[in-house]
Amino acid sequence: MILPVIVLTLIVGTFGALLVFVASLLGPKKKKTAAKYMPYECGLPGQETTKSNVSVRFYLTAILFIMFDIEILFLYPWAISYQEFIDAGYGAYMLGAMLVFIGLFIFGLLWEIKSKALEWD
Amino acid sequence: MGSDGFEITINIIKMLVIFLMMVQMVPVLVWVERRGSAFIQNRFGPNRVGPLGLTQLLADAVKFLFKEEFVPPASHKWLYYAAPVLALIPGALAFESIPLSMPIHVNTESGAHTFLFQGYDVGVGIVFVLAVSSLGAYALLLAGWGSHNKYSLFGALRASAQMISYELAMGLSLVGILMLFQTFDFQRMVEIQRGTLHFWLFGKEISLGFLPNWGIFFQPLGFVLFATATFAETNRTPFDLPEAEAELVAGYHTEYGGLKMLMFYIGEYGHMMVASALMVTFYFGGYELPFYSSQSLVEALSQSMSSNAASIVGALLLHVVFMAKVLFFLWVFIWVRWTLPRFRYDQLMDLGWKTMLPWALANVLITAFFVLMAHG
C-alpha cells in the first residue's frame, strides 16, 4: 500500500532534480564579480553566518506544538468510533470521558496563556 | 500497485498524468492570479503576449529556464539545491491521494478491473494528507538555513512557526467531520454526502429536499476554521508573514531565482490545490453533482454506449465537476489575497493559539453534543 507513495516520491524528486540540473546547464555562464555577490538594492549586508541569535519564542512554539498535536491525535480514534459507541449504548460515558480529556486540554491552554508563553512582542 | 502487468502500467501512467496535470495547473493559476489582481486593482495586467496574455506563461517559463544561475557564496550548497526539490514533494504526495472522480470499472479479456481516479489509496486518507503536507515546513526551513542569509532565515523561522501553529487548529477542526462521517477514507466521505440533506434528531428523521447532503450544512464553524487554517498553511495573504517584503525582502526564497524560485511557486500552488480539493471533499460533496448521483449518470450514459465507455466518460464528466469546484476555491484564495491586508506577527500568533484553537475545541464539543442528541 505504501509502495506507490515511494515510487511517486522518487518520480517527483527526479523531476525536480532534473529541472534544477537543466536550468544550471542552460543559463549563461558569466564571471562572478564581487559586485554580483553584494546584497541587492540597499541596506545592511544580507549574508550572515548562523551566529545571529534567534528568539527563544520559536523554540517554545515548537515544543508547545508537539504537546498539543499529540493531544489532538488522541481525539481522532475517539471521533471515528464515537457513533458506534452511542449505538452500543455507551454514548454518555464516551462523551464524559472525552470531556475530562478536553478539560485537561483547556487547562493546559489556559495555563500557557497565563504564564505568558504565547506572548509575542 | 495492481495485480497484473496491465494494472501496474495503468496505475503508474495515472500517477504521472495527475502529477503533470498538477504542475501544468501552476502557470494557469499564475496567469489567473496576475489577471485577477489586475481586474481587482483596476489595471490591465499581462495582456500583450498572445490572446488575453495567455502565452505570457510560456514566455515566462522559457525565461526562467535560461536565467543565469546564482548561488550565494556562503550557502550550504547541498541544502540550497535540495530545498526547491523538497518543496515539490509534499503537495504532489497529498494531491495524489485525493479522489478526483469516481472509480472506473472496465471489463477486458483478462478480467474485470477497477481503477481509482486518484494516484493511490493509502486507506488512512486525512491522516496521510495531514502528515505529508506538514513536511512542507522542512523545505522552507532548509531553504532559509541553506542560503545563509538572515532575511531567508527569519522568513523560514516565521513560516515554520506559523505552519505548526495553524496545524493545530486545522487538525482540530476536522474532528467534527470525523465524528459525522466515521471514516478517514475520502471515497467513503463523498459517498456519504450523496443525495439530499437528511439527518436524525431525537430519533426522528428530518430531510430537507432542497439542499444537498453536504458537510458544510453540518459543520459550518468547522469549515470556517478549516478554511482559515489552510490559508495560513499555504502562507497566503493575509497570513503571508514569511514573505513580508517590507521587512524580509522575499522571505525564505530571497536568494533563489529562475527555475528554483518557480519550484517554490509550484509547491505553494500545489498546497493551494490540495487545500481546495480537501475543502471540496469534506464540505462540498467531492466530485458528486448536487442532485444527480454518479450511479444515475452512469446508467443514463450506458443507454447509448458500452458499459466500459459509460464508466470512463462518466468519470471524466465528474472530474470536470470536481475541478470546477476546486477552481472556485482557488479563485477564493486569489480573491482574498488581493482584498485583505497582512496581519502583524503577534496578531497572527494570537489568532492561531488564542482564538482558533478554543473555537475549534468548542466545535468539537458542540458536534459531540449534537451527535449524542441526534441518536437520543
Image (cartoon, grey):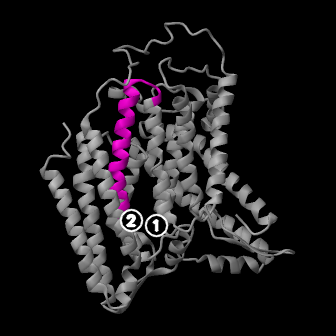
Q: Which mark is residue B282?
A: 1
Mark 2 Cα within 10 Å, few/some/many (few <14, many 20+)?
many
Tag 1 secondary structure: helix
Q: Measured from the top left, where is residue B159 in percent x and y?
A: 38, 40
Identify the chain of the residue marked 1, using the numbered disc in the image: B
Identify the chain of the residue marked 2, using the numbered disc in the image: B
Q: Measured from the top left, where is residue B229 in percent x and y?
A: 36, 53
Answer whether residue B333 is magenta in the image: no
Q: Which mark is residue A23?
A: none
* Magenta stretch in the rendered image: B146-174
Q: Is residue A49 above or below residue B176?
A: above
The structure residue drawn at horizontal position 63% and vertical position 70%, both measured from the top left corner, is B102
* Left or right for A28, reference A57: right
Q: Which mark is residue B174?
A: 2
Q: Measured from the top left, where is residue B376 in percent x and y?
A: 30, 90
**Residues marked 2 and 1 touching at CB (< 8 Å):** yes
The structure residue drawn at horizontal position 63% and vertical position 11%, both measured from the top left corner, is A30
In the displayed orientation, state which residue is furthest to the right: B109
Residue type, label 2? Leu
The structure residue drawn at horizontal position 60% and vertical position 57%, both measured from the top left corner, is B96
Residue type, label 1? Phe
Q: How many marks?
A: 2
